Amino acid sequence: MAPVRIKICGVTTPADARHAAEAGADALGLNFYPKSPRFLTPTAAAAIVRDLPPFTATVGVFVGTPMRQACAVAFQLGLRAVQSYNDHPPSDDPFPFAHVPAFRVADATQLDAVRRFVVAARAAGRAPSAVLIDSFVAGHMGGTGHVAPWHLLAGFDPGVPVILAGGLTPENVADAVAAVRPWAVDVASGVESSPGVKDPDKVARFVRAVRDCH
Ligand SMILES: O=C(O)c1ccccc1NCC(=O)[C@H](O)[C@H](O)COP(=O)(O)O
C-alpha cells in the first residue's frame, strides 16, 4: 500500500506549523474562514509559510470564498492547494493550484453528489486534484471532531484521490485507514490541546500512527 499522506489542518502559529512539518506531516492547512477558531489573516499565514521547511505543502482553507479571491490569497502566499467549501464546480480555473473541494457527508446520497461534482468539474476541464470527505454537523463547516461515516466510504471511488477528515485522532486513525483506505488523512481538533492550539505530542503520535499503517 502506498504511504497515506497526512494533512494537519488549522495550524495557527509558526511554532505549531514547524513542529507538525518536522514530525512528518506532508501538508498543513491554513484556515481563512473568519468564524473558525483556527482563522488566520493572510499576514499571520505569511509568517507561518515563511518559517516552514522547504518541502511541506501548504493548503488554504476557504469557506464560500469566490475561487478567484481564494487563488489571489494562494498566489500571494505561495500556497500549493486551495480547499474550498463552495457547493458547485468553480467557474474560474484554479490553476496553478491544486483544487480540493470539501464535502460534509452524512449519507450515501451525498456521496452521489461528490461523484456528480467530479464528473461535472472534469467535463468543464477543472477536475479536482482530490476530494476531502468530512463529517456532517449541522451549522458547522469543519473542525468539529465528529467522525465521518467510514462504513459508507469503504470502497468509495469518485475518480480522484480521497482525503478522509472528521474526528480523526492518534487513537482511531489506524482503524480509519484500515476501513476506508484513503489516499490521505486530515486532522484538526484531534491533535489539539484547545481549539486552534496544536498539541505537539498528539501531532507526533498521529503521524506515527499513520506511518505505521500497512
Ligand atoms: O477547522 C476548522 O475550524 C474549519 C472550519 C471551517 C471549515 C473547515 C475547517 N477545517 C477544515 C479541515 O480540513 C479540518 O481538518 C476537518 O474539518 C476535520 O476537522 P476535525 O474533525 O476537527 O479533525
Image (tube, grey):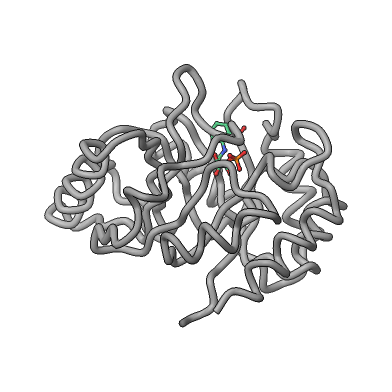
- In the rendered image, residue 187, in percent from the top left (x then y), is placed at 62, 49
Residue at 15%, 48% in the rendered image? 120
Q: Nearer the viewer, residue 77 or 193?
A: 193
Give the x, y percent position of residue 172.
62, 54
What residue is at 73 percent from the left and 69 percent from the top?
208
Q: Quadrant of the C terminus?
A: bottom right
At a point 59% along the width and 74% down the height, the residue shown is 213
Q: Quadrant of residue 183?
A: bottom left
Q: Nearer the viewer, residue 61 or 43?
A: 61
Residue occupying the far top of the picture: 139
In this view, the residue farthest toward the bottom is 1
Towards the viewer: 32 or 19: 19
- The answer to whether any part of residue 204 appears in the image is yes
Residue 163 in the image: x percent, y percent?
A: 45, 56
Q: Is residue 75 left or right of residue 100?
A: right
Tell me: 176 left or right of 136: right
Question: In terms of image quarters, where does ligand 1 lie?
Answer: top right
| Residue 91 seen in render | no
- Please count the marks in the image: 0
Residue found at x 85% / y 54%:
200
Residue 106's quadrant in the figure?
A: top left
Q: Position of residue 153 (x, y in %)?
A: 35, 53
